[in-house]
Image (spheres, rainbow, N blue to C red):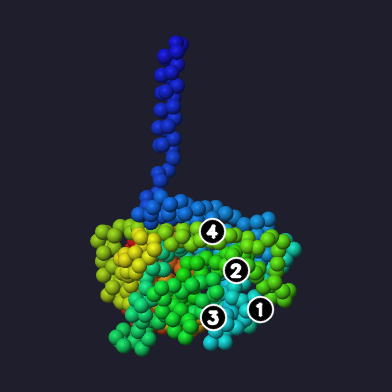
Amino acid sequence: MNSLKKHWLVFATVVIALYSCEKLMPPLPSDNELLDGPLAGLTAEQNTIFLNGDIAFNDEVFTPSNGLGPLFVATSCGACHAGDGKGHPFSTLTRYGQVDETGNDFLDVGGPQLQNHAIPGFSPETMPPGIGHSKFTPPANTGLGFLEAVTDAHLISLQDPFDLDGDGISGVVNWISLPDFVSSGDGSIAQNEKHIGRFGKKAAAFNLLHQTVNAYIQDMGITSDFVMQDLFHFNNGAFATDNIADPEVPAATVNNVVFYLQTLREPSRRNEDDLDVLAGKNIFDGLNCNGCHLSEMQTGFSPIEPLSYQVFYPYTDLLMHDMGSELDDGYTEGSALTSEWRTPPLWGLGLSEISQGGEYFLMHDGRAHSIEEAILMHGGEATQVREEFKSLSAGDKDKLILFLESL
């Protein structure tokens, strides 16, 4: 065979191989099937910071050699937020104890969180008996920067503590004390030296720095420039200090993760023009589900330009609502009552099954295994909505679920 024929044969073989691989490989998921990815409009420098934060969040796994524990719940950020989505019962957190006006004070016995794993040489914590506690399933990370950029003034304007409009809904903000490493910043509103929380099941974290630093130390036992002390081990009555020099992650890494969380894009809708989905939206509004799950909000100023003065669609009011005795776990954070929970954003709800292993685990502790189950667990301020949902025809219930799955 001459040289020319050999070259053509090699070329044809490569083309056939590439074509065959393309046919055999599954197609890439579309944007509306994913929760991760950066905001549009970031600068090249910002995209680099985003990538560094992505690596720290999703790729860095901690072991005893680089600071894990001694007490911990998970070994990485991504372990609790697969694909930046909701967590699974395996990664659910147990929360108890705080210091505030409610008297819920159990920090000397391991609060505010149970660390149920330990590195070799240490014993994991066990739950002290007779203490009110709650299970928290890790939330999705999508669109958090938009929620952070909503102004305190706007959240206060959404409150209706005395239900003056007579719709049965009386949301309030959660007033919390700030740790030393968190600065309230311009535009923050204080009341009796407390500030408005907006992240977490009880809205007990002020901003994404607060949330991230807490996650490093409480979930993974990782010290940082913001919190230099290892966790208190109440079983031993002492701090469970390891042999790794503190801080175990520098401020630069924490700040990269914070920026990553701030600049994760908002989730994209699916099937939003479908007639049944549109009918489901009308049913959602007609039931007054949007009395708590507001479809539209607007950010204020943000130093991250793509987040400034943006209208977005999270389906939350970020307020605390009394959800009734069935969801009262006897645990609180900040000024929230034990039966009060922050309205969770519904955007991205339809993708929750993917990150949760093919099954829904909804509500604050994952106790609901379908969207309908979650609706039927709404009590307190949502009792009327729940009862009206029960009276819907099967077809209308299906349309409402289709709408929620489209978010």
Q: Which residue carries the number 2 mark?
A: 227
Q: Nearer the viewer, residue 32 or 203?
A: 203
Total marks shown come to: 4
The residue under the point 55% across, 69% down is 214
How far apart are the two marked residues, 3 and 1, measured between alpha carbons?
A: 15 Å
The reply to whether callout 2 and callout 4 are in contact (CB within 8 Å) is no
Q: Which residue carries the number 1 mark?
A: 109
Secondary structure beneath dot 4 equals: helix
Q: Height in image: 321 above or below 313?
A: below
The residue under the point 40% across, 46% down is 28
Q: Please state, as top left, top right, bottom left or bottom right, where the C terminus lies in the image.
A: bottom left
Q: Which residue carries the number 3 mark?
A: 331
The residue under the point 35% across, 59% down is 306
Task: Look at label 1 and name its amino acid.
Answer: Val
How far apart are the two marked residues, 2 and 3, measured between alpha carbons?
A: 24 Å
Whichever of callouts 2 and 3 sits on the residue coming sooner in the sequence is: 2
Which numbered disc, 3 or 1, marks the residue closer to the eye?
1
Q: Height in image: 20 above or below 43?
A: above
Left-right relation of 364 to 274: right
Whichever of callouts 3 and 1 sits on the residue coming sooner in the sequence is: 1
Q: Nearer the viewer, residue 14 or 183?
A: 183
Q: Which residue carries the number 4 mark?
A: 252
Secondary structure beneath dot 2 equals: loop
Task: Look at label 4 and name its amino acid.
Answer: Ala
Graded by Cα atoms within 10 Å as few (under 14), some (14 to 19) or many (20 or more), the crowding at tag 3 reads: many
Task: Look at label 3 and name its amino acid.
Answer: Tyr
